[in-house]
Amino acid sequence: MEGSIKKNYYLIFNNIMTYLPSRILIILNSVIIVPLFAYFLDEKQISIYLIALQILNLICTCSFDWITKAVLRFYEKYNIKQALSTFFSSIFWLSVIVYIFIIICYFAFKGLILERFAVDNMSFLFTTLLVIPCGIRQFLYQVLRVRNQAKLYTLSILLYQLSFIVLFFAITRIVPNAHAVLFAMLVAIIFIDIYIIRSIYLNYKIEYRIDTRILSEVLKYALPLIITNTSYWAILNYSKLIFQNMHEFLNTAITGISWMLSGNIIQPLVTVFTFASFPVLIRKFELKRLYKSYFTNILQLYCFLLLPILCIFCYFSKEIVYIMLPKNYEMVSVMLPFFALGIFLHEFMKLINIKYHLKNRTYIEMLFGVSIAVGAYLLNIKMIILYSVLGAAVALFLSEALLVFINLVVKFRSFDYLNYTKILKTFLLLAFIGIILLGAVQFIFMPFTANKYLYITKIFIYVISYYAVSYRLRDKILA
């Protein structure tokens, strides 16, 4: 392996490791919370919570997510220009306008949501109230990222997880329903927002105006993101909304638990690549130092570190469900591989699509996202009618695979930042290693009687062996 490539991997790995502890905390929390939801709440209450959570995600996607993403994208530019006070003033007043719009939408669409998706009035109110603290938290997290304050970020995650778990236990013992979970989230997030604000010093004076040039640049970059991320949200959540609209609460719960179990464990790991790499790539781009090999190496390392985790969900889904969930969620074991693959591909695609953000051409990503979202809706309807929850899982996987395929195949000369041959080589070598090790581990454990501890041991040995062999062959895999 060349020295420059080794240096790239060293820098990328160091950036990832600064945020990895926070991701591990999220995973540990999910390992605790997901089984608790399954054991303490009935199917209908879980379905209400899941739909309320997705409504919250959609509102945040259409409001504060794109604003906070703009903070991350343009912070370095206005820092170089020494115009951060003007920049943050414009962001602040834009956020105020957006939330006024959210309040109007709350009253306009409240009746429709309560009727179509069996969400009660109190759950919807809590969901709307969560938007402000969630938006503030996202903004603060972006500031911590551009300042590279990973320790404070990790500590805030730890405090949030602990406070949420304590509140969940305390409130659900009295009121075991979706209201308790949403209220616990609301209190925990407000607590963390206050903690971060008190821990950092923002020396920016808020001016009573919006800079039109900044506003124009932010909107040009971010408005397509609203449509793009709404399309992605729809692709990921069509099935839950369809089942809930049909009042098939158990199927909503099964689909949601499958998503939470795979997503809340895989996604924190895969998103750390975007989380750690995006600011670095933006900085390199603004300083005219973006190199094709660095971007390519990020995708190769993504496969190197994440494929073993993906294979656990694909090859040991029955064992995972047996260990973590009650018997009425056995169908989750069939759905886990499709959801895990879908999440892996989704985050892989988001890394690839950083190229559109660098060139401020996010409308290209938007066009692809909208096109696939329309097809995914029709596919979900057809597959759910034919195969119920299994059809929903297959529809998600096929939609994500098509998204990745389109963004890989459609190339533009000005977006030539990746060496796809190297990335494919890394993926195929790692996949081959995973299949060989699976056969070896299954053969070794064949004589033993199946039980929960055996399953845990088998999974542990498989993933350790996978990483050990991959590390031994790293020069060939990552070259």
Image (spheres, helix red, strand yellow):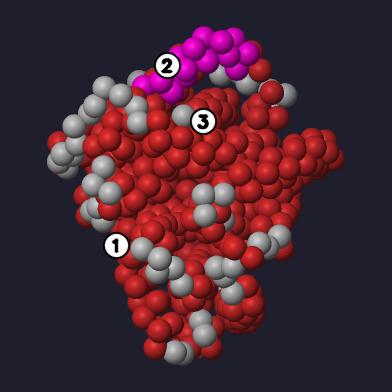
Bin the neighbour count of mark 2 within 10 Å (Cα to Cα): few under 14, some 14-19, many 20 and up: few
Q: Which residue is mark 1?
A: 18
Amino acid under label 1? Answer: Thr
Please state which of residues 405 and 430 is positioned toward the viewer in this rendering. 405
First in sequence, mark 1 or 2: give its number: 1
Q: Which residue is mark 3?
A: 62
Q: Mark 2 and 3 residues: CB-CB less than 8 Å, in contact?
A: no
- Expressed as whole percent of the image width and height from the top left, the position of residue 339 reads 62, 51
First in sequence, mark 2 or 3: give its number: 3
Amino acid under label 3? Answer: Cys
- Residue 71 versus residue 417 in the image, above or below: above
Bin the neighbour count of mark 1 within 10 Å (Cα to Cα): few under 14, some 14-19, many 20 and up: some
In this picture, residue 311 sits left or right of residue 291? right
What type of secondary structure mainly makes up the magenta span? helix
Q: CA distance from mark 2 to mark 3?
A: 13 Å
Please state which of residues 365 and 297 is positioned toward the viewer in this rendering. 365
At 68% from the left edge and 53% from the top edge, which residue is drawn?
A: 403
Which callout, 3 or 1, points to the residue nearer the camera?
3
- Residue 226 versus residue 397 in the image, above or below: above
- Residue range (magenta): 95-114
Q: Which residue is mark 2?
A: 100
Q: CA distance from mark 3 to mark 1?
A: 29 Å
Q: How many marks?
A: 3
At 53% from the left edge and 27% from the top edge, which residue is drawn?
A: 55
Which callout, 1 or 2, points to the residue nearer the camera?
2
Please state which of residues 243 and 372 is positioned toward the viewer in this rendering. 372
Q: Mark 1 and 2 residues: CB-CB less than 8 Å, in contact?
A: no
Amino acid under label 2? Answer: Ile
- Residue 101 versus residue 41 in the image, above or below: above
Circle 3: element type: helix
